[in-house]
Image (cartoon, rainbow, N blue to C red):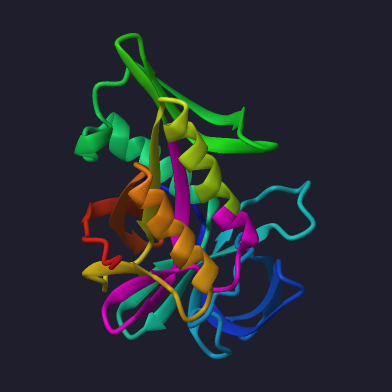
């Protein structure tokens, strides 16, 4: 997926108020950028880290710069823009990369379902049950293993429970972990950070909810799903 720029490199000074970040550009100027990620960004928001900002050139935005990428470790760029994950997964379905989600004629986004929720992607075909796909953007990793969530998330557990209800009604449900970094070889729930989420994920899998994890190649101007990685969920 191409992501238009211009792109500006810099160093993170601080992240604050959840959606803001101060970044020092290469020319020494300091700018405030919007942070399109509601998570803690554990391991991805340390002062001094190299970052890339995207200039949206949108005069209507209070903060036209968007913090999109961070070098979490030398040579490893991580995509922090959670909104891009849905587009990456949709592109992967449409290009045939995601094998288990093929043979559906229609893809719809942000369809209301569950308890005042919206499913990220709804796949439909006349000869099969609808497939509800919940997408989670993953930025946290340790020792080559991607982990989610990076903070306690009641909302993420709620989504799992709603997927269980989909299966109970005869539908198909998929939990898709979109890992926006290429330095991982597997995925596991972060039980030490949010033990309830880990329990709910295992319960959902036992109830028939499916799960996939794909890692992505990330860089300024282009992000694309690379390949599936195994889910470790004993």
- The segment highlighted magenta reads 132-157
Compared with 70, 2 (above or below) is above
Farthest residue to the top: give it.
Answer: 126
Q: How many labels does the image show?
A: 0
Residue 176 visible in this rendered orientation of the protein: no
**Residue 118 part of the magenta segment:** no
Residue 91's image quarter?
A: top left
Image location of residue 170, percent across then percent down: 41, 25
Residue in the picture at 50% in, 79% down:
44
117 vs 205, nearest the viewer:
205
Image location of residue 209, percent across then percent down: 37, 43
Image location of residue 218, percent across then percent down: 34, 62
Farthest residue to the bottom: give it.
Answer: 48
Compared with 124, 127 (above or below) is above
129 vs 222, nearest the viewer:
129
Residue in the picture at 48% in, 49% down:
84
**Residue 133 part of the magenta segment:** yes
- Quadrant in which the C terminus appears: bottom left
Residue 88's image quarter?
A: top left
Residue 77's image quarter?
A: bottom left
71 vs 128, nearest the viewer:
128
Residue in the picture at 46% in, 64% down:
199
62 vs 119, nearest the viewer:
119
């Amino acid at each position: 997926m191409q992501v238009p720029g211009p792109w500006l490199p810099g160093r993170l000074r601080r992240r604050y108020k959840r959606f803001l970040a101060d970044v020092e550009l290469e020319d020494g100027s300091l700018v405030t950028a919007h942070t399109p990620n509601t998570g803690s960004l554990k391991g991805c928001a340390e002062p001094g880290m190299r970052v890339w900002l995207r200039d949206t050139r949108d005069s209507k935005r209070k903060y036209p710069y968007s913090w999109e990428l961070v070098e979490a470790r030398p040579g490893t760029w991580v995509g922090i823009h959670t909104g891009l994950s849905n587009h990456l997964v949709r592109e992967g379905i449409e290009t045939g990369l995601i094998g288990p989600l093929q043979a559906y004629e229609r893809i719809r986004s942000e369809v209301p379902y569950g308890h005042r929720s919206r499913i990220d992607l709804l796949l439909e075909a006349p000869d099969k049950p609808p497939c509800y796909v919940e997408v989670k953007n993953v930025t946290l990793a340790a020792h080559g293993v991607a982990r989610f969530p990076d903070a306690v998330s009641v909302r993420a557990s709620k989504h799992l429970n709603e997927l269980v209800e989909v299966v109970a009604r005869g539908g198909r449900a998929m939990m898709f972990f979109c890992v926006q970094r290429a330095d991982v070889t597997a995925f596991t729930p972060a039980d030490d950070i949010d033990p309830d989420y880990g329990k709910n994920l295992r319960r959902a899998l036992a109830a028939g909810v499916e799960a996939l994890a794909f890692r992505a190649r990330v860089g300024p101007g282009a992000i694309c799903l690379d390949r599936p990685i195994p889910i470790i969920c004993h």
